[in-house]
């Protein structure tokens, strides 16, 4: 009996090999996975949500070993961390920040047998795949809420770094805000840091001083919502449910749920079906969503969000379909034109209604 | 005008945690002990302050607890540097790593919680002075305490006998020993009190400023304080100026962005560090000529009595 099982496995193994698959199946109990996190897993934000995904893997595949390194700076340091994972036997490494991109490619070249998955980047290789979620869809929906409910028509937006990912989020948020309220403007302040609660607080205060009565955010700690709550200003959270930091002022949060995509990737690796593809999941898979609305959000706003969400999930419309104008009022995307994923991933201009600058070097 | 006031008030607010850490470090360094563990001690202070405030409901208990635990933790560095005469740089760096790790480990349960914390308490009478009032006297009590500490330390270090003894121990422990001072006792006291004040800087972040706990929430402020001690040339008043400069540059560039002015912000952010390097060059040139300014002459050197014990 046992012999037959093994024979079967061998046959399947070779059969799959003959279909020219680059990677062999790995039994769950032999699979070791390394996670590289940019912030501490206790940041209550980006890295925290990825770590929830890691824990979902352990739950879904008992026997799989996961390792993680937290607070790994972007740049040369992360290459060392990834190599350490490989030396410790990892066959799969998740690099969960945009700034790891070049190092992922570099380390992947050294270890062609190891699978690397890079989150939010755009460079691929034979053993480097990409995964990400279309957070901009949830951002757009949360923008609808912000636009509907601002009275001063100024929405403050403390943002981490001027990179395509963040620019995309600001654009989607602004498109939503202006769909609901054509007079709304989104003021951007760059933090040049993913995680600095003190700085996030000062930036939020600066925006409130500049007239913002609604705050969006794209940084990793809960400092922005906490400051908004303290100042009595509404806030739209990001990463995870920020209402714990702003119990009365957080209207909703656009949040990640990484568990499904991680479980899917692991399944492919275990079965030997993994291929270097760019996996960009949409709202229909549940990878991004809005948290439940605060009681201050009026019914008609909820209905508006519901309608737009249905269009996105059905695929009848998406956020970056024309017409879209840039900051200076020039038409960038014509009526009926759709931005390609490539263009969406490498955004380097702001849409109309954003007040702020993208530094030239970007 | 309103913008200037709001920037300067923000400078005081965001400079205060750095100011506490710098003042604490000045006390420690004046006794001749170099402590590079500020970042770790601040984090332990932040966690202690937050957790005790949350559990007891009283922010002042949290700040007192932060002071006490900060003092105890820094005494480990004291023991290695004073009694064991170990390498102070290594021990200090170890304190940073230790403090970061321990606070992350113990702090897991407190993530995502907020506290009412220290509230803004306008200083009676003084807050009505035009311009100065809203900048300096419209904060929480801990900010006023930092003003007091600056004035007190300036007086204490220069005009009191104990202050003189402390400086003597840091400048020339041999001479101080000959004078009959107990070198180790003075150094231990300086390390404990200084460490406690550094921890209050951390607690300010979690109890008064952000009113929440997240891992590594000091985000490098401990290291800024290490630089500030040099920038201030070990003088408490200049430390306050420096802390507000560091805080103010930050607040200024964020507000510039919010109002839509485009000045390259990295240039502004670089400024305080550039000034620190200039001061360092200035001190080093002075040292070559035998002028010390305020630098403790035996900083970082363990003291060996000549006779063996």
Image (cartoon, coloured by chain):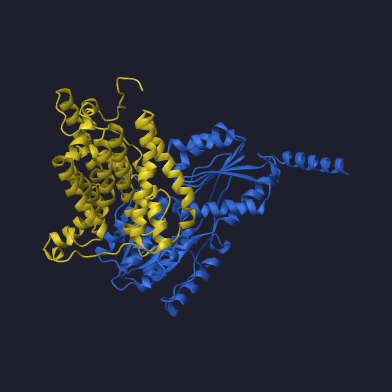
Residue B24 position by quadrant: top left
Q: Is residue A333 visible?
A: no
With A48 as the anchor, is A349 left or right in this view? left
Q: Is residue A282 visible?
A: yes
Q: Is residue A112 above or below residue A4?
A: above
Residue B114 position by quadrant: bottom left
Name the residue at 15% across, 32% down. Answer: B293
With A273 as the anchor, is A220 left or right in this view? left
| Numbered marks: total | 0
In the rendered image, residue B222, in percent from the top left (x then y), is placed at 32, 43
Q: Colour of chain B?
A: yellow
Residue A147 position by quadrant: bottom left
Q: Is residue B56 above or below residue A266?
A: below
Q: Colour of chain A?
A: blue
Name the residue at 16% across, 64% down. Answer: B127
With B184 as the anchor, is B56 left or right in this view? right
With A94 as the anchor, is B189 left or right in this view? left
Q: Nearer the viewer, residue A73 or B245?
A: B245
Name the residue at 42% across, 44% down. Answer: B100
In the rendered image, residue A92, in percent from the top left (x then y), is placed at 60, 42
Q: Is residue A284 above or below residue A109?
A: below
Quadrant of the image containing the N terminus of chain A: top right
In the rendered image, residue A350, in percent from the top left (x then y), is placed at 35, 57
Q: Nearer the viewer, residue B6 or B123?
A: B123
Name the residue at 64% across, 54% down. Answer: A59
In the rendered image, residue B64, in percent from the top left (x then y), is placed at 34, 54
Q: Nearer the viewer, residue B18 or A113?
A: B18
């Amino acid at each position: 009996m046992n012999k037959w099982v093994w024979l079967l496995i061998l046959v399947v193994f070779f059969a799959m090999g003959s279909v020219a698959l680059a990677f062999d199946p790995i039994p769950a109990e032999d699979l070791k996975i390394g996670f590289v996190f940019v912030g501490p897993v206790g940041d209550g934000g980006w890295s925290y949500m990825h770590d929830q995904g890691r824990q979902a893997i352990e739950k879904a595949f008992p026997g799989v070993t996961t390792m993680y390194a937290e607070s790994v700076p972007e740049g040369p340091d992360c290459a060392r961390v990834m190599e350490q994972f490989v030396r410790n036997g990892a066959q799969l490494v998740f690099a969960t920040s945009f700034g790891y991109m070049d190092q992922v490619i570099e380390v992947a070249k050294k270890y062609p047998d190891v699978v690397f998955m890079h989150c939010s980047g755009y460079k691929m290789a034979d053993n480097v795949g990409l995964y990400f979620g279309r957070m901009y869809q949830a951002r757009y929906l949360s923008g609808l809420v912000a636009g509907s409910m601002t009275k001063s028509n100024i929405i403050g937006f403390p943002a981490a770094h001027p990179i395509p990912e963040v620019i995309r989020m600001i654009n989607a948020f602004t498109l939503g805000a202006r769909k609901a309220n054509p007079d709304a403007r989104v003021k951007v302040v760059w933090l040049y840091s993913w995680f600095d609660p003190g700085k996030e607080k000062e930036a939020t205060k600066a925006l409130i001083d500049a007239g913002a009565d609604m705050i969006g955010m794209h940084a990793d700690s809960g400092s922005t919502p906490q400051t908004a709550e303290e100042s009595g200003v509404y806030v739209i959270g990001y990463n995870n449910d920020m209402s714990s930091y702003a119990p009365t002022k957080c209207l909703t949060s656009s949040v990640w749920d990484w568990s499904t995509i991680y479980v899917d990737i692991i399944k492919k690796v275990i079965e030997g079906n993994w291929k270097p593809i760019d996996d960009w999941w949409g709202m229909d898979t549940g990878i991004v969503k809005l948290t439940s609305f605060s009681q201050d959000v009026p019914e008609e706003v909820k209905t508006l969000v519901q309608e737009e969400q249905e269009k996105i999930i059905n695929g009848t419309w998406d956020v970056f379909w024309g017409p879209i104008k840039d900051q200076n009022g020039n038409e960038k995307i014509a009526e009926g034109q759709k931005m390609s994923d490539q263009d969406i991933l490498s955004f380097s201009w702001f849409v109309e209604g954003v007040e702020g600058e993208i530094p030239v070097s970007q | 005008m309103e913008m200037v006031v709001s920037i300067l008030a923000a400078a005081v607010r965001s400079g205060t945690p750095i100011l506490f850490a710098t003042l604490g470090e000045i006390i420690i360094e004046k006794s001749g002990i170099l402590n590079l563990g500020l970042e770790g001690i601040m984090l332990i202070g932040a966690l202690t302050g937050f957790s005790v405030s949350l559990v007891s409901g009283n922010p002042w208990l949290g700040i007192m607890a932060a002071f006490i635990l900060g003092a105890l933790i820094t005494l480990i560095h004291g023991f290695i540097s004073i009694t064991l005469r170990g390498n102070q740089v290594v021990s200090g760096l170890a304190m940073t790593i230790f403090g970061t790790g321990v606070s992350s480990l113990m702090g897991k349960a407190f993530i995502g919680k907020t506290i009412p914390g220290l509230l803004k308490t306008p200083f009676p009478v003084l807050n009505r002075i035009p311009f100065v009032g809203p900048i300096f006297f419209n904060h929480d009590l801990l900010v006023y305490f930092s003003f007091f500490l600056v004035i007190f330390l300036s007086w204490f270090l220069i005009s009191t006998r104990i202050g003189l003894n402390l400086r003597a121990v840091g400048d020339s422990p041999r001479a101080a020993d000959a004078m009959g001072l107990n070198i180790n006792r003075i150094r231990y006291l300086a390390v404990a009190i200084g460490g406690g004040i550094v921890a209050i800087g951390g607690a300010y972040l979690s109890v008064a400023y952000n009113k929440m706990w997240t891992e590594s929430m000091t985000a490098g402020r401990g290291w800024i304080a290490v630089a500030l001690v040099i920038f201030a040339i070990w003088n408490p008043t200049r430390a306050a100026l420096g802390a507000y400069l560091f805080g103010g540059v930050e607040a200024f560039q964020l507000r510039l962005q919010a109002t839509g002015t485009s000045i390259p912000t990295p240039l502004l952010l670089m400024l305080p560090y550039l000034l620190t390097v200039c001061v360092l060059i200035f001190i080093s040139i002075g040292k070559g000529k035998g002028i010390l300014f305020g630098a403790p002459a035996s900083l970082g050197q363990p003291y060996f009595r000549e006779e063996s014990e």
